[in-house]
Image (tube, rainbow, N blue to C red):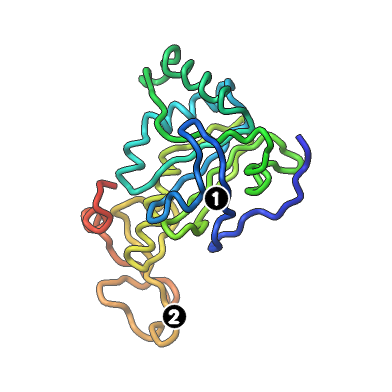
Amino acid sequence: MEKNEQQLPRLGEPVPAFEAMTTRGKISFPADYKGKWVILFSHPADFTPICTTEILTFGARTEEFRALNCELVGLSIDSRNSHIAWLKTIREKIEYKGMKDVKVGFPIIDDVSMKVASLYGMIQPGESQTAAVFFVDPKGVLRAMIYYPLALGRNFDEIRRVLVGLQTIDAFGIALPADWHPGDEVIVPMKGDDQEKTPEGAKCYDWFFCTKPLPKEEIEQKLGEKV
């Protein structure tokens, strides 16, 4: 593949907009997904083993993500016809880790021209075959991104944890510590005069580092779904 010198999309900024044909028809991104979270993810090519396991997993867990107000959008630089043939093979022939007869209901973008891949910096100099995951919030702002080399399959529990974490940050105005999972303590942002006092219900390790409980049930009530 040709090297791409374009700058990567930046966290905290609106994602690049585009229109594209997909396995589910034409989409305008991110306009069609206003009000929803979106996970936009790429894979290097159809009919490859690691990507097959990932599409299977996304397909099997689609409703789990939708319950969290999150839609999935896939992309590779293959054609729509190739995508459709691949998805048919996956549904009819592939059984993996208990997943079988998986119908992929989310769109996969036809990007033979590499327009979207280039726009999002998915083609990396020095590591041309990469896989990327972009987390886009309901306002169309890029909130997180993860890149993987071709040989490393994605961790879907971590993808879900990132999504739930971002939603929790927004809902409660807090920050999250290392290895956070729903139900763990969260970090209370400390600034200005707050540094002179301990926030109610918080435990402070020092003036700059305070945590407080945030029960899983409270997160689920706020997000409206089990986490």
Query: Which label belongs to residue 191?
Result: 2
Q: Disc 2 on helix, strand or loop? A: loop
- Residue 132, position as x, y percentages in the image: 58, 42
- Mark 1: few/some/many CA within 10 Å (<14, 14-19, 20+): some
| Residue at image point 34% right, 42% down | 66
Depth check: give the residue in front, 205 or 74. Answer: 74
Amino acid at pointer 1: Met
The image quarter in which residue 157 lies: top left
What count of labels does the image hold?
Answer: 2
| Residue at image point 39% right, 24% down | 103
- Residue 217, position as x, y percentages in the image: 21, 54
- Residue 131, position as x, y percentages in the image: 60, 38
- Cα distance between the residues tagged 2 and 1: 27 Å
Q: Tell me which label, 2 or 1, sits earlier in the chain.
A: 1
The image quarter in which residue 165 lies: bottom left
- Please state which of the two labelled residues, at mark 2 or mark 1, is closer to the viewer: 1
Depth check: give the residue in front, 38 or 27. Answer: 27
Q: Disc 1 on helix, strand or loop? A: strand
Amino acid at pointer 2: Lys
Depth check: give the residue in front, 196 or 165. Answer: 165
Side of 200 where 84 appears, left or right: right
Side of 62 where 149 appears, left or right: right
Query: Which label belongs to residue 145?
Result: 1
Depth check: give the residue in front, 139 or 175. Answer: 139
- Residue 51, position as x, y percentages in the image: 54, 27
Query: Which label belongs to residue 59?
Result: none
